């Protein structure tokens, strides 16, 4: 049984509030935005699991559109008086499986842009079929003085192809490979990706 994380109290409150609002309004925009703007892989997996679990989940994840499709028949507009349902969502952290696959078997992944305070003016652009936050943590365990930070992420179909296209657009020709990582200067990247 997983323990409740003390550092996530505000996160739990916000997600549970939006989960209740989803039941009352049938609109998932705010909770979907919380999923997209998660601060780490725990938050992503928590929201994904909360919305899609077999017991009290109310949606299916549509991978190609990066949206949650709500099953309106599962919504309970009187959720605030449904004590057993509320108890399940407020204790969901106990049943969270952090090995949950949010990539749909590798067909979808996350393009990410990472930066590192120890490498000012440089960004790492790549993809992962897992969590971009887990990838940043993995890279931070290599010989770097500071941890990598996720600055941008987008869920994409065929992430390897998208990564290749982004690298081409930034002018990557194989010569800009630094220490076996795709790292670019910020100004050059901005100018080339925006145009």
Image (cartoon, grey):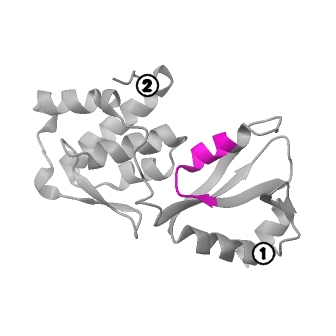
Q: Residue at x 37, y 62 (%)?
A: 67
Magenta includes 31? no
Q: Position of residue 181 (x, y in %)?
A: 78, 57
The disc at residue 192 is 1
Q: Is residue 128 above or below residue 162?
A: above
In magenta, the rendered stretch is 127-138
Q: Is residue 135 magenta?
A: yes
Q: Residue furthest right?
A: 175
Q: Which corner quadrant holds the N terminus? A: top left
Quadrant location of the C terminus in the rendered image: bottom right
Q: Position of residue 74 (x, y in %)?
A: 13, 51
- Residue 62 image point, x, y percent: 34, 65
Sequence-wise, the earlier of marks 1 and 2 is 2
- For this view, does 61 lie left or right of residue 165? left
Instruction: Report how far apart the C-alphas of labels 1 and 2 lie in the structure.
Output: 40 Å
Q: Is residue 124 left or right of residue 100?
A: right
Residue beneath disc 2: 9
Of helix, strand and loop, which one carries label 1? helix
Residue toward you, 190 or 65: 65
Q: Residue 76 or 158: which is nearer the viewer?
A: 158
Q: Is residue 187 left or right of residue 114?
A: right
Q: Residue at x 43, y 38 (%)?
A: 98
Residue at 67% in and 77% down: 165
Q: Is residue 169 left or right of residue 174?
A: left
Give residue 78's mark.
Answer: none
């Amino acid at each position: 049984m997983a323990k409740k994380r003390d550092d996530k109290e505000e996160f739990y409150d916000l997600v549970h509030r939006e989960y209740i609002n989803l039941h009352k309004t049938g609109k998932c925009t705010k909770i979907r935005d919380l999923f997209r703007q998660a601060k780490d892989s725990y938050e992503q997996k928590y929201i994904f699991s909360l919305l899609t679990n077999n017991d009290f989940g109310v949606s299916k994840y549509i991978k190609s559109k990066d949206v949650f499709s709500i099953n309106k028949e599962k919504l309970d507009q009187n959720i605030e008086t449904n004590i057993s349902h509320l108890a399940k969502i407020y204790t969901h952290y106990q049943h969270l499986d952090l090995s949950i696959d949010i990539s749909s078997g590798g067909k979808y992944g996350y393009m990410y842009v990472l930066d590192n305070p120890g490498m000012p003016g440089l960004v790492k652009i790549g993809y992962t079929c897992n969590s971009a936050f887990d990838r940043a943590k993995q890279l931070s365990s290599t010989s770097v003085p500071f941890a990598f930070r996720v600055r941008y992420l987008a869920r994409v179909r065929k992430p390897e192809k998208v990564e290749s296209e982004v690298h081409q657009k930034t002018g990557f020709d194989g010569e800009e490979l630094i220490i076996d990582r795709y790292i670019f200067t910020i100004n050059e990247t901005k100018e080339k990706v925006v145009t």
